Amino acid sequence: MPRPKGSQNKITSEIKDKLQLLIDDLIASLNVNELDANQRIKMLQIVIQHTLPRMKKTTNEEIENLPLFL
């Protein structure tokens, strides 16, 4: 019998939980003060990608369908 629509796979959620624990331990062990400027910037870039929602490409179809000259 298949899973209900929208429910997570058991293995996927277990892996996510284990990865979260691993990431938490890694972040706790980092000393940001020991990183140089380039390493801090790189770390910030990686964290931002996973923290902030990504912008979706939007198009305004109304503008695209208008004639060039009125």
Image (cartoon, rainbow, N blue to C red):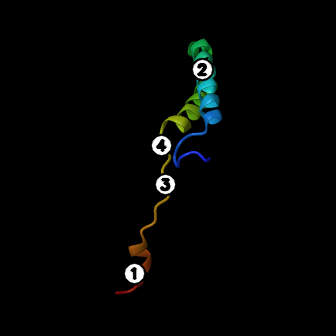
Label whose residue precedes the other's in the sequence (1 or 2): 2
**In the picture provided, is 5 more to the left or to the right than 67?**
right
Label whose residue precedes the other's in the sequence (1 or 4): 4
Q: Measured from the top left, where is residue 31 in percent x and y?
A: 59, 13
Amino acid type, mark 4: Pro
Spatial CA distance of label 2 from label 4 is 22 Å
Q: Nearer the viewer, residue 22 or 54?
A: 22
Marks 1, 3: nearer the viewer: 3
Quarter of the rendering occupied by the C terminus? bottom left
- Report which residue position mark 4 lands on: 53
Residue 34 against residue 9 in the figure, above or below: above
The outermost residue toward the bottom is 70
Helix, strand or loop at mark 1: loop
Spatial CA distance of label 1 from label 3 is 23 Å
Q: Measured from the top left, where is residue 33 in percent x and y?
A: 57, 13
- Report which residue position mark 1 lands on: 66
Label whose residue precedes the other's in the sequence (2 or 3): 2
Residue drawn at the location 61% of the way across and 22% of the way down: 23
Spatial CA distance of label 1 from label 2 is 53 Å
Count neighbours of disc 4 (C-alpha within 10 A) and say few if under 14, some if 14 to 19, many if 20 or more. few
Residue drawn at the location 38% of the way across and 74% of the way down: 62
Marks 1, 4: nearer the viewer: 4
Number of disc labels: 4
Spatial CA distance of label 2 from label 3 is 30 Å
